[in-house]
Each structure stands twice: as structure tokens, then as C-alpha cells.
Image (spheres, rainbow, N blue to C red):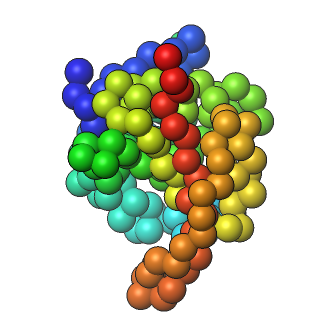
Amino acid sequence: MSRGQPTLTGPTVALRPIDAADLDGLHAAASDPLIWEQHSERNRHERAVFEKYFKGALDCGGGLVIMERNGGRIIGSSRYYDWDLDGSSVVIGYTFLERAHWGGATNREVKSLMLAHAFEHVATVWFHVSPGNLRSQRALERLGARLDRREQVPVGGVPSDRLIYRIDRPQT
């Protein structure tokens, strides 16, 4: 199993490494503008903008496709990035799910699978969230993530705030 691109299976979803052949299926899942309304790149539902997101998922070495186990339909994506084995941390982010999977158990299942895998390798998992993305903030807090800090990063050459959440590996 690859550290950055594992295949993970839960009761209702499966995550597998992203592949170039996934572009159409992922874009279909991402084409609802409401998915992106609280993100810093609100027009990511547009094909040309989504293709940049998709290329980033391919290039980062940690992009994952989220599929329904029953039928294998693509319903979203997430990724691991910025692995720092010396600092014992990784970031999980760029997650999206079709709206039909909002508010239920899907996001918790996806993140629980990803966290369990990450904690086999690192002690801390970070999450970068736009301050306006209240859905993601609440979802992370329900998982037990704590707000660590706020920082500014360039987005398209413009300084942009982001919130940094963390979850530490449970003590055994």
C-alpha cells in the first residue's frame, strides 16, 4: 500500500488513487456550483477551472477518488499533500463530495479512513480551510479537529486567509 495514495475501504465508500481516466467522472461529481460556493475558488465547477484542480490532484502524488462501494460511482475526491515525515505530519484537503452525500456519514467515513491511514505514518494531520467555508469547519470540528491558527497565503497572487486545523494521533 502506498503511503500517499492508498486504497482504503469502508462500509459505504472506497478511496483509490486518482487516475487520468477519472477526469470525466470526477468533473460530473464536481459540476454542481453549490459544492464550491464556500470555497476560495468558487468557479471550480467550470470544466477549465476543474481541470487545474484535477491536474493538481494527479501531480501531488496523494490524490484519491471517492466512490460508492455499491456500484462504484465516483462521488468526490480528497488528497494527502505536504507529507513531512521528519516533522511527522501531513495535510488532508481539497475534499469535495456530491451534495447527495452532505450532512450524513460519508464525510466522516472518508476522513476516518484517511486519518487512520495517515496515523500509521505521522503523528499530526493538518487541514487548511477557507474562513468562509463554514461547512468544512463544522465537519472538521465534529471529527475532533482543533483550530490551531490563521495564516495568510497567496492564492492567485493575492493574499488570502486560511484556517489551520489539526488532529493528533490518539495516544495508545
In-image side of 31 versus 74 (left or right)? right
Drawn side of residue 38 relative to residue 59, left or right: right
- Up-down relation of residue 38 to residue 151 (above or below): above
Rendered view: 61 above or below 45: above
Front residue (pair 17, 82): 82
Numbered marks: total: 0
Viewer-closest of 54 and 94: 94
Which residue is at a point 31% across and 48% down the rendered structure image? 87
Q: Is residue 164 left or right of residue 141?
A: left
Q: Position of residue 92 (x, y in %)?
A: 45, 45
The spot of residue 18 in percent (x, y) is: 31, 38
Identify which residue is drawn at 28% across, 37% down. Answer: 4
Q: Does residue 116 show up?
A: yes
Residue 23 in view (yes/no): no
- Kindly identify the residue that appears in the image at 55 percent across and 47 percent down: 166
- Residue 112 higher or lower than 141, as above or below: above
> Which residue is at the far bottom?
158
Answer with the quarter of the image where residue 110 lies.
top right
Residue at the spot 54% in from the left edge and 33% down from the top edge: 111
Left or right for 138, reference 7: right
Image coordinates of residue 29 in percent, x first then y, are 54, 43
Residue projecting furthest to the front: 172
Quarter of the picture containing the N terminus is top left
Q: Closest to the observer: 154 or 56? A: 154
